[in-house]
Image (cartoon, rainbow, N blue to C red):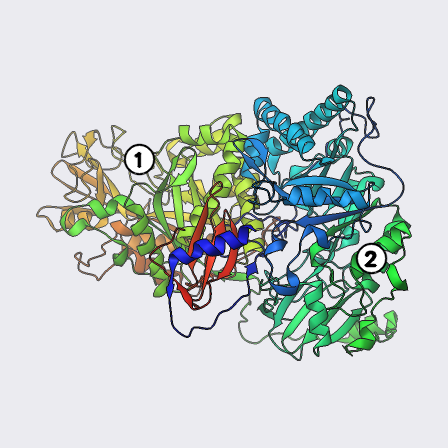
Amino acid sequence: MILERRLAQALLVCFALVAISHTSDTTQTVRRRLRRPSTSSSNKDQEVSASVNRFKVRSRVTSSPPSLNASRKSATQAPATTDDGYKVVCYYTNWSQYRPKAGKFLPEDIDPDICTHLIFAFGWLKKGKLSSFESNDETKDGKVGLYDRVRNLKKANPKLKTLLAIGGWSFGTQKFKDMSKSRYARQTFIYSAIPFLRARYFDGLDMDWEYPKGTDDKKNFVLLLKELREAFEAEAQEVKKPRLLLTAAVPVGPDNVRGGYDVPAVASYLDFINLMAYDFHGKWERETGHNAPLYAPSTDSEWRKQLSVEHAASMWVRLGAPKDKLIIGMPTYGRTFTLANTAQFTVNSPASGGGKAGEYTKEGGFLAYYEVCEMLRNGASYVWDDEMKVPYAVQGDQWVGFDDERSIRRKMGWIKENGYGGAMVWTVDMDGFTGTICGGDVKYPLIGAISEELRGIKRKNNAKDIDWSKVANTISLETTTKLAPIKISVSELVSKIKTKTPQVASERTTTVVTNGRPAQVFCYMTSWSQKRPGAGKFTPENVDPLLCTHVIYAFGTLKDHRLAEGDDKEGDNYKKVVALREKNPNLQILLAIGGWAFGSTPFKELTNNVFRMNQFVYEAIEFLREYKFNGLDIDWEYPRGADDRASYVNLLKELRLAFEGEAKSSGQPRLLLTAAVPASFEAIAAGYDVPEIAKYLDFINVMTYDFHGQWERQVGHNSPLYPLESATAYQKKLTVDFSAREWVKQGAPKEKLMIGMPTYGRSFTLVDQDKFDIGAPASEGGTPGKYTGEAGFMSYYEVCEFLHGENTTLVWDNEQQVPFAYRKDQWVGFDDERSLKMKMSWLKEEGFGGIMVWSVDMDDFRGSCGTGKFPLMNAMRQELEGYTVKLEYDGPFESSHPASSAYTTKDPNAVSCEEEDGHISYHPDKADCTMYYMCEGERKHHMPCPSNLVFNPILKTL
């Protein structure tokens, strides 16, 4: 066998070690069938149910009729199936052969009469064409492959239909995107699939795209199914054979379904639909929940009550799926947890993580049914939950929600009562297939119960169900009886209220805001500040992490429409910025993309293609997670026109929805989404649908500065709070106060508006040194600063140097509430501690959410001005102390604010397998030198070295 050859090859990388005991167990990761967008480097097979999104998206269901009638039948050849009752569709995994000891599963272990359809999981895609994956899938070198061994089952049961599945959790979504995005790509796949399936005697193809998302994917998935169905029919007519079956495994999460599936069209092309009605709860959550409850428990929140088999199936029917095509998923495994408190063991009890790995499946948070049987026979207590109609078991701090024969039979009754098409089993190899572990000498107790209930096929030897409530310890849950309502006389109550004497407070009372938060302080740090000369050089280590609630590093960039580092050295700078959390664990650190120099064109190109935009969104998540950023700041300067306005909203929406879903899947705090937006009323009107963007953004950073500058031929202040009385009507709109009010007027919640505070000034060269007041003629920008080196621009510490020069005059403008200074022909308008304190008083009076500072590296970070380090930042923070922002906005995501900035620490000894087409790699087990990991693409096998040998970490290839 192939494993023997691999073990023999392992001798090349193992060296002798005397008296080391040999461990023979091999580990095989169980491949999840539910996908989540995540970049976690830990093993992904059993990580998080992405089939169940944790947030709602309202989406209109397409009602247009598909090109194929929903109830159509082939006009040529009948499909390779027999419609003789309920279907029992069983998935078989080709990696189950690698499980150790009693868990090792081969095609010969399958009972050929127990299922109506057997789906081989999984095939693969190479260069856009259907192919095998495991090295022993195919028959070669005189050894019969798994495909042929599965085919041999038909000798015992000629009615058995076998299909090949492509996709699944490890396969991911990108290959499906690429394969379905054009007719050429689709046809390349289709016309490789048909001969591949026929040559290996499969009866059909099962599409497991996990999951299509967005308009392009939704459309392309329908087109792919349509063209497959049409090709299957044409091929059947040509070769005079039964048509190949076409099926698909589909999710249960409402947002996945609505976001990626045109249900009526999808249903019309598929022979049946395998609904993955499991993984509703698991180790990605911090409270216990059942893997596949038929009904949600009453203790669930309103949102969690969506997470049940009954709700998922009903949703697919409501969206247009025929009941007789829906094959309801039944898991032969359980999801496990480690209880935080053993005294609390019911559903929705606190959990610290997944349960311990099983002896055979070797995956934390996961047990095959036969492993659950062992647990129950070794002292675990059995609990039947009559609300969910499923059992769970408890042993010490270990908790597992699973299905047994009793719950399976209950679900079968529900399937028949509701007219569904049958049951799908994930997987045949995790049921009690030997008949020895679960007891009673009953092979396949769960699938046998399914077959018995749906097909009327009695189990051999008149086998009886195992009643775990009698075999195992049992815990009876107390039923809490609700007290009868107390009747209160309305007239009596009213009379009491009327006679109550109001109390008049003799002292001033303080209103306590129960729904509020402190003001936020967003500090931008620019990447180029590290390149300033001399005393102007600013590095991440110069940031005072206690002065800001958020630090935004500006800027990342786009490369091939993907989020990327600005240059080759930026990765190190990202790590240094993120390291600031070591001094302030509550500090949130974001990466900004865009800016003035970046321009608008890259954003236009990014958003004019849905696939391109979605690719950016999901790869951005991976990028941000890799560097441990807390969020993304979008600085599109600026969207303009109807198309840009819509594209900008779509970009923010996709990002927010993706951030929400990824957080709930990964267990990490949700990534923040913010944006820098213009202060100009004209720019707002030209490109911003304010109420819509406010839904998706956590915070809106208003760039209330650069109202005037070197582009004008008269001096004006960079950031006036109020206008001059003598200003024109247009000029009066160029102030901090007017701009902030304009954003509110257009629909922005005050609590989300972060008002921009500049730590720099705009300078001019006067035409006439005797004319220096606001509006005086200017010929150009002022002389460049010594450190910033830009004409018309001075950092605050450069302004300080200017003020210290001889014959410099400092003026306080009482109308605009800001200072300016001049010397000879040089003029600069800036903010100092006094003006910023005035702005803070105004901000608190108006009720805005906080401030945004551009930028922290232009404050006097070295203390050269004479009032200590970061005088502007400190002045603002001091003024904001004790200020509480009222939270009044009721948006669609307002209950999902990130709880903290903490990241889950990765186990340094963990091994992650990255997919490389056909590549096999080897990695040391750092905890045990007698073991090693073999990666086949993303699939990981835990392998033992031969007896008395250990793994050589230097030689990593066989």
Residue at mark 2: 448
Which residue is pictured at 19% across the width and 58% down the height? 862
| Residue 737 position (above or below residue 241) | below
Which residue is pictured at 50% across the width and 29% down the height? 644
Judge whether residue 477 can be spotted in this image: no
Mark with earlier residue (1, 2): 2
Horizontally, residue 583 falls left or right of residue 825, namely right
Q: Callout 1, which amino acid?
A: His
| Residue 676 position (above or below residue 833) | above
Q: Hey, which quadrant is residue 237 in on the image?
A: top right
User: Which residue in the rendered view is the most extreme toward the top?
Assistant: 238
User: Which residue in the rendered view is the most extreme toward the front?
Assistant: 142
Seen from the viewer's position, the closer of residues 38 and 297 is 38
| Residue 589 position (above or below residue 682) | below
Helix, strand or loop at mark 1: loop
Q: Hey, which quadrant is residue 102 in on the image?
A: bottom right
What distance separates the C-alpha of mark 1 from that of mark 2?
Answer: 79 Å
Report the disc number at residue 708: 1
Judge whether residue 833 can be spotted in this image: yes
Seen from the viewer's position, the closer of residues 287 and 877 is 287
